[in-house]
Image (cartoon, grey):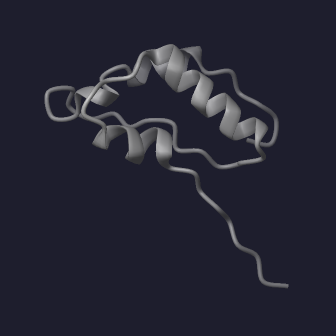
C-alpha cells in the first residue's frame, strides 16, 4: 500500500508571511488545534534571525511552552 505523510507547515511557513506578529499563546492554540484535528507532523517554528523574520522571534519560548502529544 502506498502511504502519504502530510506535514503541516502553517505555524512555521504560513505565519512568517504575516504582516503582523501573533502572540505566542495564539500560536500555541493553533498548533494544539492542528494536533487535535489529527495532524501528526507539525512544523511549529524555525530558528531564524528575528530581524529577518520577526514573526518567528519567539521560537525558543514557543517550543518551551509547547506540550508534546503522543503520536505527534
Count of marks, rendered view: 0
Q: Residue at x 48, y 46 (%)?
A: 10
Give left or right: position of 33 versus 23.
right
Q: Position of residue 36 (x, y in %)?
A: 77, 36
Q: Residue at x 49, y 20 (%)?
A: 62
Which of the 4 quarters of the picture holds residue 51?
top left
Which of the 4 quarters of the picture holds residue 33?
top right
Q: Residue at x 42, y 20 (%)?
A: 60
Q: Position of residue 43 (x, y in %)?
A: 52, 44
Q: Position of residue 34 (x, y in %)?
A: 67, 39
Quadrant assignment for the N terminus: bottom right
Quadrant assignment for the C terminus: top right
Would you place residue 56 above or below residue 14 in this image?
above
Which of the 4 quarters of the picture holds residue 65?
top right
Give left or right: position of 55 versus 27.
left
Q: Residue at x 64, y 62 (%)?
A: 6
Give left or right: position of 5 versus 30.
right
Residue extending furthest toward the front: 19
Residue extending furthest toward the right: 1
Q: 69 or 30, which is in the foreground? A: 30
Q: Position of residue 58 (x, y in %)?
A: 37, 19
Residue extending furthest toward the left: 51
Amino acid at each position: 500500500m502506498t502511504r502519504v505523510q502530510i506535514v503541516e507547515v502553517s505555524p512555521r511557513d504560513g505565519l512568517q508571511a504575516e504582516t503582523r506578529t501573533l502572540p505566542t499563546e495564539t500560536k500555541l492554540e493553533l498548533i494544539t488545534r492542528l494536533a487535535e484535528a489529527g495532524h501528526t507532523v507539525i512544523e511549529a517554528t524555525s530558528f531564524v534571525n528575528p530581524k529577518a523574520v520577526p514573526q518567528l522571534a519567539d521560537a525558543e519560548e514557543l517550543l518551551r511552552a509547547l506540550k508534546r502529544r503522543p503520536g505527534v
